[in-house]
Image (spheres, rainbow, N blue to C red):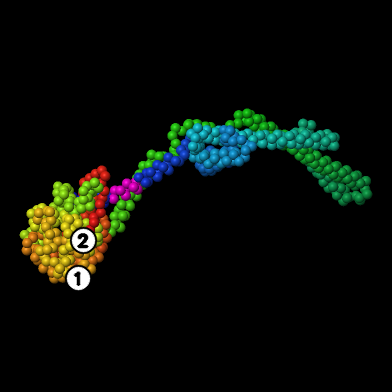
Amino acid sequence: MSMHNLMLPVLDYLRILRRRVWILAVIFLTAVGLTAWSTYRQTPVYQASCRIRYKRTSPTSLLTGGALPYYLNPYFDNVSFETEKHVITSKLIAEGVVRTLGLAAPENRRQWNSWARRVQGAISVNRVSETRIYQITARSSDPDLAQALANTTAAVYIDSSLQEKQESADKTLAVLTEQIEDLRVRIQQSEMAKIDYVKRAQGVPESVGAGDDREGVRSGIARSASLLDELRTTLVRQEIKRQELLSNYLEKHPRVREIDRQIEVLREKIAAENEQIIRAHQSAIEYGILEQEAAANQDQYQVLIKKLKDLNISDSGIESGIEIIERAERPGSPIAPRRGRSLVLSGLLGLFLGLGAIFLIEYFDSTLQTPDEVKNYLGLSVLATIPRMEISRGSKDSEKLPFLISRRDPSSHEAEMFKHLRTGIRLGNPGSEGLALLITSCSPQEGKSVISSNLAISTAQAGMETVLIDADLRRPVLHQVFGVENRRGLASYLAGESSREEIVIPTSLPGLSLVPSGPIPPNPSELLESPRLAELIQYLKESRPRIIFDAPPAGALTDAAIIAGRVDGVILAIFAGKGNKKFVLQTKQQLEKTGARIFGVVLNYISLKLRSYYYFYHGVYKYGYND
C-alpha cells in the first residue's frame, strides 16, 4: 500500500474535523466552562495529618507459655487496628475534641451535637502498612481548623487511653484492697480457731508436739502403734498359756483364774491404747486442718500484699503506650477542588466528546459535503467546487452580483472556479461544436441559476458564442439578472406566439445572448414536450457553439427530465451539506432513465475552510442563492 493511499483516510478525517470544528469547540468550551464554574464555586477543602505510634509493651504474664505475645500476633494487629479506628472516630473522642478546642458550649446541646458530628465526619484513620503507626487525617474548609482537629484528636485519644488504663488500675487496686481485708479477717478467724481448740484440748495434742512439728505427730502415732502390737502379742501368749492350763486344770482353778485376770487386763489396755491412738489421730487431724487453713490464708495474704505493692509502684508510672511521632502541620494549599486537574480532565473529556459527536454526526449525516463523497456515492466526477460567496451589503446590485461574479470580478476565486468548470467541459468534449448543456439541481435554492449565468459569461469571455436559455418556466430569474424584458421568450416560442429570432436577445456582454423564459405559462411541462424545443436547439447549434439551459429542479418536477433527453449533457448542481444523498441519487437515476448523459456535478456553496482558504471581510453576510 502506497503512502498516498495511507494518507487519504487521514486527509478525510482532517476534512471532517475542519468542517465541523465548531461542534468540537462548543462541546470543549462548554465542558471546560461548566467545570471551571463548578470548581470555583466549591469551598476549598484542606487536609492535615498526624501520626501516632503504638509502643511494644509486653504484658506482665502470658496466658499460655507457648503462645506468641499479643504484640507479635498479626491477627491481633488487624483486630486492634479496626477496633482503635472506630474508637478514634467515635462520638466520645469527637466530643472531647469539641470540648478541648471550645468549638461549642456543652449547655447548647444542639450546637454541641452538630459540632461532634462534624468532627466525626472530618476525621479518618489509616494504618501505615506493616507498621504499628496510625495516621489520623482531618479535613476542613479552614486550614487552621484542619491542623487543630488532627492534633487534638490524637491528644484526646491518648488521654482517653491513659484515663482508661488509670481507671482499670484503680478498679484493680480497689479489688485487691478488698480481698486483702477479707483475708486479714479470715487469718484472724483461723488463729482464733486454733486458740479455741488448744483451750478445749487443754494443750496442743501430744502427738503434735510442743513445737507443732508434724514429724512429732507421726513419731507419737508410731510409738502408740508399737505398744499396741506388744500388748496384742502378750495377749496371744496368755491365751495360749490358758489353753495349756485348761488341759490340766479346771476353769475355776486358781492358776486358770489368774491367767484369765491377766488376759482381761491386757484386753483393757489394748482397748485403752486403741482409743488413745484414735484420739491422737483425730486431734492431730483437726489441729492440722486449722493449721493448714491458717497457713494457706497467710500465704494468700502475702501474695496479695506483693501484688498491691507492685500495682502501687506501676500506678505511679502508668503510660498509655501511645505517642505522637509526627504532628500535623498547617496545610498550605487545598486538596479539593483540584482546579487544574479538573480543568485538564474536563478539557480531555470535552475533546473526546466533541470528537465523538463530530464522527457520530458525520456517520448519520445524509448530505454530500465533499467531492470524494460525491464520487463514492453517486459515481460522478466533480467538475468544479464553487465556494460560498460573501457579498458586501453596501455594493450596488448586491443581489445580482453572485449571478454576474465572473463579469464583475473576473480575477476572483469564484470566477476562477467557473473558468475551471468551463475548461472541464471543453476537455471532456474535445472538438465538439454546438454543445447543448442543461444545468439543474435536485431541489430549489441550490444555486443552479448562479452556475448557469456565470458559466455562460465565462464561456463567452473565452470567445465562444453562447446562448443562455432560462428554461425555468415556473420561477424565472435570468431576465432580471441581465436586465432584459420578459414579454417574449421560451414559453411564447414553444406556444407558437414568437419566432426564434425574436426570443434570442443579445446582452451587454459580447458573445452572450439570452433567451428569457417569457410569460409564465399554466402548463410548463406540456410546452417543454413540444417539438419546437428540439427545433430551437438545432437552430441555435448551427450558429453558436455553446447553449446552456437553466432548468427547474429535477427532483420534484419533470421539466428538467424532459429537456435532459434533448441536450448533449447534464450538469447537476448540489448544495454542499444541504440535500439528502438518497434524494440526490434518485434524481440522478431519474435523469439517467430519460437517456440523459450526466457530465458531472458542480458542488456549490463549499466552505473555504475545507479548501484551506480563509477570507474575512468586515460587515459581510452570507447570501442565499435565489433561483
Residue on which disc 1 sits: 526
Q: Which mark is residue 476?
A: 2
Q: Please say if the residues under marks 1 and 2 sit with CB atoms less than 8 Å apart.
A: no
Q: Earlier in the sequence, mark 1 or mark 2?
A: 2
- Can residue 299 be spotted in the picture? no
Of residues 390 and 250, the one nearer the viewer is 390
Crowdedness near tag 1: few (<14), some (14–19) or many (≥20) residues, C-alpha within 10 Å: few
Q: Within the magenta stretch, is there residue 599? A: no
Q: Within the magenta stretch, is there residue 26? A: yes
Which kind of residue does numbered mark 1 sit on? Answer: Glu
Q: Which residue sits at x=84%, y=47%?
A: 239
State the separation of the CA atoms marked 1 and 2: 17 Å
Q: Is residue 544 above or below residue 257?
A: below
Which kind of residue does numbered mark 2 sit on? Answer: Pro
Q: Is residue 70 above or below residue 584?
A: above
Q: Which residue sits at x=93%, y=49%?
A: 252
Rendered location of residue 193, percent (x, y)? 80, 36
Secondary structure category for the residue under label 2: loop
Q: Quadrant of residue 446?
A: bottom left
Rendered location of residue 131, percent (x, y)? 48, 37
Of residues 118 and 94, the one nearer the viewer is 118
Q: Main secondary structure of the magenta part?
A: helix
Of residues 472 and 201, the one nearer the viewer is 472
Horizontally, residue 547 falls left or right of residue 557, namely left
Q: Which residue sits at x=63%, y=31%?
A: 315
Q: Which residues are magenta?
A: 20-28
Horizontally, residue 239 falls left or right of residue 501, namely right
- Can residue 388 be spotted in the picture? yes
Q: Which residue sits at x=83%, y=45%?
A: 235
Rendered location of residue 624, percent (x, y)? 25, 54
Secondary structure category for the residue under label 1: helix
Q: Quadrant of residue 626?
A: bottom left
